[in-house]
């Protein structure tokens, strides 16, 4: 794309699985992506991440980590990824923390630093993405914490994800409140 029009901004959605799988993380190298990117948009959906990470650990337990229980597989992946999150039997109900959002944003910003051009990092946080009953749901406090975590991690901006029509007004208001408190609105 850059050879066709060097002024055309080029960016990429970074699949959330890169923050669950040590194997996917090893494959998605930000130091390579920065060479041909103007922006990246890592998905750091902390609410739905609990259920998604739980499902990933269960799948890994059924395959590559077959000698481990699902709980042991999740603990091993937490250790490999540098996470301190809820245990296997609770992570679906709690989701991942704002600390997860900050760590993954920081990992992305540090990974794209020092390239041939500045690379913006616009993480996407989830607001009211539909989930099954009993799984972590957004709260105004959680949205506010996630928005602040993006900027604490060095994010250039933020994308409120996934679909506007899914978002509850009180959670959108919380995102706006956080941006105002940070002096970014």
Image (spheres, rainbow, N blue to C red):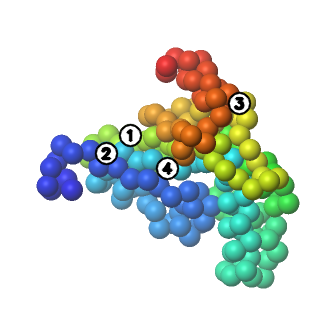
Residue sitting at x 61%, y 30%: 172
- Disc 4 secondary structure class: strand
- The structure residue drawn at horizontal position 14% and vertical position 55%, both measured from the top left corner, is 4
In contact (CB < 8 Å): disc 4 and disc 2: no
Task: Answer with mark 3 or mark 1, whichever residue precedes in sequence.
Answer: 1
Give the residue pinned by disc 1: 120
Q: Pointers 1 and 2 in contact (CB under 8 A)?
A: yes
Residue at 49% x, 39% y is 159
Marks 2 and 3: in contact by CB < 8 Å?
A: no
- Secondary structure under the numbered disc 3 in the rendered image: helix
Pointer 3: what residue? 140
Measure the C-alpha gap from mark 4 to mark 1: 11 Å
* Res 151 quadrant in image: top right
Which type of secondary structure does the marked residue at label 1 adopt?
strand
Q: Residues within 10 Å of mark 2 (few under 14, many from 20)?
A: many
Q: Earlier in the sequence, mark 3 or mark 4?
A: 4
Residue for badge 2:
38
In-image side of 86 versus 7 (left or right): right
């Amino acid at each position: 794309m850059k050879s066709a029009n060097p002024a055309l901004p080029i960016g990429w959605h970074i699949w959330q699985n890169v923050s669950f799988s040590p194997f996917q993380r090893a494959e998605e190298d930000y130091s390579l992506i920065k060479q041909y990117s103007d922006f990246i948009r890592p998905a750091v959906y902390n609410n739905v991440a609990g259920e998604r990470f739980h499902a990933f650990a269960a799948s890994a337990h059924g395959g590559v980590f077959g000698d481990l229980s699902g709980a042991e597989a999740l603990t091993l992946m937490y250790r490999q990824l540098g996470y301190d999150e809820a245990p296997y039997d609770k992570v679906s109900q709690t989701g991942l923390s704002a600390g997860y959002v900050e760590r993954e944003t920081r990992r992305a910003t540090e990974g794209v630093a020092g390239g041939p051009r500045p690379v913006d990092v616009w993480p996407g946080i989830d607001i009211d993405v539909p989930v099954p009953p009993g799984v972590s749901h957004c709260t105004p406090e959680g949205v506010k914490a996630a928005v602040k975590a993006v900027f604490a991690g060095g994010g250039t901006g933020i994308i409120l994800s996934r679909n506007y029509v899914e978002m509850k007004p009180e959670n959108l208001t919380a995102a706006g409140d956080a941006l105002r408190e940070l002096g970014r609105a």
